[in-house]
Amino acid sequence: MRLPPLNALRAFEVAARCLSFSKAADELSVTPAAISHQIKALEEWLGVALFKRLNRAVMLTDEGQTYVLGVREGLVAINTATDKLVKRDSSGALTVSTLPSFAVRWLLPRLSRFREEYPDIDVRLSATDFLTDFNRDDVDLVIRYGSGDYPGMRTVKLLTEDSLFPVCSPELVNGEYPLRTPNDLMHHILLHDDLRIDWETWLAAAGVKGIDSKKGPSFNDSSMVLTAAMAGHGVALGRSTLAADDLAAGRLVKPFDVELKAGNAYFVVCPEETADRPKIVTFRNWLLKEAASDPGRFMSSPKEDPQKS
């Protein structure tokens, strides 16, 4: 392809439309001398005069009148193609992969706010425990729980997991066997997350002995553990991030003050080469805004129900 400089073509098209170098300069926010220089360079490149220079005006030559039609058509085509590309990267489908527990407990309850704010972006949520291979999987970004060590990726911390602590339903805490001290757990069923959470460690930190920390039903997903606790099936160890909304809404309560510090966090992760695409930036910024406004409200140890005393 033999293509002249794009800036010269733009200057020529505007000057031909305005029939004035000064008006073209105003439209393109440059000086008339710059327009004159661009057109002169284009004429030299083509070996053809495009304008007739008069005392106080310019006119297109026959060659200029013919050439401007093709130039204008080409610039419109470039503009259309560019708009389509920009809109594709700023709207349409956005595939997000995350853990099922995080999807159910944190992300899904908030997604309606994203849809209201950005109706042109359709979030496709993939809830899975499997790691994403960006070279193989049709995924734009992931939200993962871990240490944040993801080589070759743009990694942004979303939420810090502060602690682990027992949670249960409000009915259970003041039920037949009230939960007043950690030792009261001997009368209750322990619910287990068999992938991440260890009751044995918490019971030792609370100074509790004589309870079989391995006994009780187990679940391979943290969200199911919390659902079982809300249904009154026993006492679960809840992660602060996942339990926050249920605690704030009163669906769960925190019977004791003893907590285990958690060492990991949630991160937004995507390849460096796609990290600055508009719709990815939009969703990542929205996630960070939601995380910053997260209530983080945990109910304190419940006071004894006077009717139960």
Image (cartoon, rainbow, N blue to C red):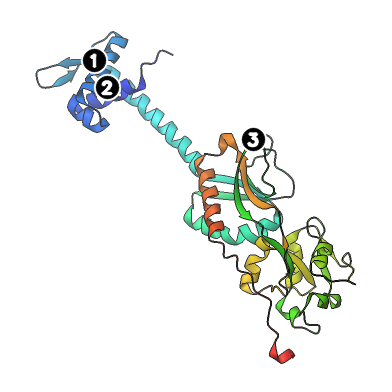
Tell me if I can see residue 20 in this picture.
no
Could you tell me which residue is drawn at 13 percent across and 22 percent down?
A: 57
Label 3 or label 1, whichever lies nearer to me, is 3
Amino acid identity at mark 3: Gly
Disc 3 packing (10 Å; few <14; some 14–19; many ≥20): few
Amino acid identity at mark 2: Phe
Q: Which residue is under mark 2?
A: 12
- Is 116 located above or below residue 257 in the figure? above
Q: Which residue is under mark 3?
A: 152
The answer to whether the residue labelled 3 contacts the one labelled 1, judged by CB atoms less than 8 Å apart, is: no
Give percent across and percent down for residue 104. Answer: 67, 60
The answer to whether the residue labelled 2 contacts the one labelled 1, judged by CB atoms less than 8 Å apart, is: yes
Amino acid identity at mark 1: Leu
Q: CA distance from mark 3 to mark 1?
A: 52 Å
Picture quadrant where residue 272 is located = top right
> Mark 1 or mark 3, which is nearer the start of the sequence?
1
**Element assignment for label 3:** loop
Give percent across and percent down for residue 248. Answer: 61, 71
- Is 13 located above or below residue 170 in the figure? above
Could you tell me which residue is drawn at 56 percent across and 57 percent down?
A: 291
Q: Which residue is under mark 1?
A: 50
Give percent across and percent down for residue 277. Answer: 52, 39
Residue placed most toward the observer, 91 or 104: 104
**Element assignment for label 1:** loop
**Element assignment for label 2:** helix
Quarter holding the N terminus is top left
- Is 83 located above or below residue 166 in the figure? above
> Mark 1 or mark 2, which is nearer the start of the sequence?
2
The number of numbered badges drawn on the structure is 3
Disc 2 packing (10 Å; few <14; some 14–19; many ≥20): many
